[in-house]
Image (cartoon, rainbow, N blue to C red):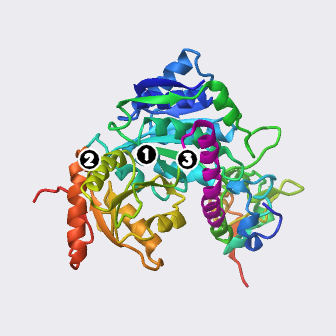
Amino acid sequence: MAHRVGMEVSIAVSHAVQMSRAEAIAAYPITPQTHIVEHLSSMVANGDLEAEFVNVESEHSAMSTCIGMSATGARTYTATSSQGLALMNEILFIASALRLPIVMTVANRALSGPLSIWNDHGDIMAARDIGWIQIFVENGQESFDHSVMAFKIAENHQVLLPTIINMDGFILTHVVEAMEFPDQEMVDKFLPPYHPLFHLTPAKPVTMGAFAMPEIYTECKMAHQMALTNSYDHILNVWKEWGNLTGRHYQPVEKYKTEGAKVLLLTMGCLSEVAEVAVDEMREAGLEVGLLKLRLWRPFPFAELRNAVAGSKLLIVIDRALSLGGAAPPVLAEVRSALYAMRGRPQTASFVIGLGGRDIAPGAFKEIVAQAQEEAQQKPTEEYHIFGVRG
Amino acid sequence: MSSKPMDQVTWQEIEVGAILTEPGSARAYNTGDWRSQYPVWTKSRCIRCGVCWTVCPEAGISEEPGGYFDMNTYCKGCGICAKECVTGCISMVPEEE
C-alpha cells in the first residue's frame, strides 16, 4: 500500500532512487544538492541500498565515472547543482552521445559570479543543448514521482538517453512536504531491472566513443537529434502508466485555470505554485488569467505549447535566467520560436524573475500581469524586463 | 555500424550511441592517405637497429623479411623516423600525383 510521509524533499528523492534500485552512484557534494547524495551514501554504507557508491574529487569525475558505470550496464544515478553542473559540461555531451541512460537530479542554483548558492535556472539553461531529456518539477511529490519515472524513460531501448530532473534549490530541495510513497512492490513492477542494449563486457566487446571523421559526424548528430525528438511519445507513455497506477497524471505543458483565459502566464519549476496562488486571486477579482507550466524542456513540446496558447491574446513568459547579450532570455526565445509560424498567435511579454534566490511572492505575478497588459496596448519598448531590478 | 564506405552511411544506419559492434574499423582506415611525403630506406646504410620502428608514433613501419624496415599503409609521413635514424639512411620523398 502506498503511504503518506512527511520529509525533506531531498531525502524523498534519495528514497526514490533507492526504491528505483539504482546500482551505481558517483557524486560530489554541492549545495543545495548535498542532502540527496549524502543520504544515498548512508543507505549504501548501511546496506539499505545494494549499489556501488563512488566518491570522486570533482563533478567532472562524477559524470565521467557515471559514464563508465552506465556503460557496464548498471542503473546509474548522480545529482549536482550550479558550478558542479558547469564543471561536468564537456562530459554531459558525451553521456548523451553515447546514449547512456544516466539519471541526474539538478538542484537548480544560480551560477557564479557573483557567488550565490541560491535558486534560479541559470545552471541548467547554460547546459540546455547537452542532448539530455530535461524535466522540471514543482513540488515534493513530483520530485519523487519523476525520479522513479526518469529511469524507466531513460532505459527504454527506443529512448536510451540520459535524463535530468530539475528541482529548485532550497525552495524545493530543503522544504519538508507531505508526499505519497508507493510500495516497493509497485515500483519493482513498474521499473524492472535495466537491460542495456550494449554494454562493456569481455564476452562481446564493443567500442564506445570512437572517433568520427567529417564523413560521419553529421549523421551521428542527426541520429542523436532524432532519438531525442522521438523520445517524446515514450516519455508520455511512461507518465501515463504512472498516472494509471498512482492517480497522478503529468503533461508536458500543464494547464491551470486556462479556460477562457485571455492572458496566460508561463512558468517552470516550483514558482509555478506561487503563480497558482496569484492566478486564484486574479480569477476571484474577475481577471481572465490562466497559467501554463512547462514541465518538459527537452524535447521541447512544440505542438502542445501551440495548442495550450490557442485562443489567448497575451502570453507572459517567466524566465529564471538571462541570456546575456542575446535576443531574449532562454525560455522566451524557445517559446517565441515555437509560436512564430502559428496563425493567430498571442502577443508575448517577457519577465525575468527570482535571480540568485530573490524571493517572489504572489503579488509579483499580479504586478507582472498588470504591467504586461498595459504594455500590450502600447508599442513595447524593451525586449524583456528584469522584474524588480533597482535603478 | 554497417560495412558500407563511411561516406555512404545514413543517419538511420548509425548504431545507437555510434557504438562500433565489430573490431577492426581503425585497421580498415588507411591513414596513409593523408601523407604528403614518405620515408625511403637506403638499405646499404641500414644497420637494422629498429630505431625507426620504435619511434614511429603510428605503427606505420613494419619489419620486413631479413630484418629491414619499410613503411606500411598507415604511415602519415611525419618524418620522425628520418630525423631519428642512427645512420641517416632514411630520406623523406614528396608524394606526387
Which chain does the residue under circle 2 lie in? A
Q: Earlier in the sequence, mark 1 or mark 2?
A: 1
* Foreground residue among A246 and A199: A246
In this rendering, the answer to whether A165 lies above or below A9 is below
Q: Which residues are magenta?
A: A221-249
Q: Residue at x 57, y 39 (%)?
A: A247
Looking at the rendered structure, the kind of residue marked 1 is Leu
Looking at the rendered structure, the kind of residue marked 3 is Thr
Verify whether residue A258 appears in magenta.
no
Residue at the left extreme?
A391
Query: What residue does disc 3 label?
Result: A163
User: Does residue A166 appear in the picture of this structure?
Assistant: yes
In this rendering, the answer to whether B47 lies above or below A302 is above
Q: Residue at x 58, y 29 (%)?
A: A182
Q: Earlier in the sequence, mark 1 or mark 3?
A: 1
Q: In terms of secondary structure, where does tag 3 sit?
A: strand
From the image, give the main secondary structure of the stretch colored magenta.
helix
> Which disc number belongs to residue A85?
1
Q: Nearer the viewer, mark 1 or mark 3?
A: 3
Q: Residue at x 43, y 45 (%)?
A: A85
Which chain does the residue under circle 1 lie in? A
Is residue B27 toward the left or the right of residue A53 in the image? right
| Residue B79 picture location, percent across and down | 64, 65
| Residue A60 picture location, percent across and down | 48, 42
Looking at the rendered structure, the kind of residue marked 2 is Gly
| Residue A258 picture location, percent across and down | 40, 59
Instruction: Give the quarter of the image for residue B39.
Output: bottom right
Dot 2: within a 10 Å radius of its alpha carbon, few (fewer than 14), some, or many (20 or more) residues? many
| Residue B60 picture location, percent across and down | 74, 60
Label pair 2/3, CB-CB below 8 angstroms: no
> Which disc number belongs to residue A356?
2
> Which disc number belongs to residue A309?
none
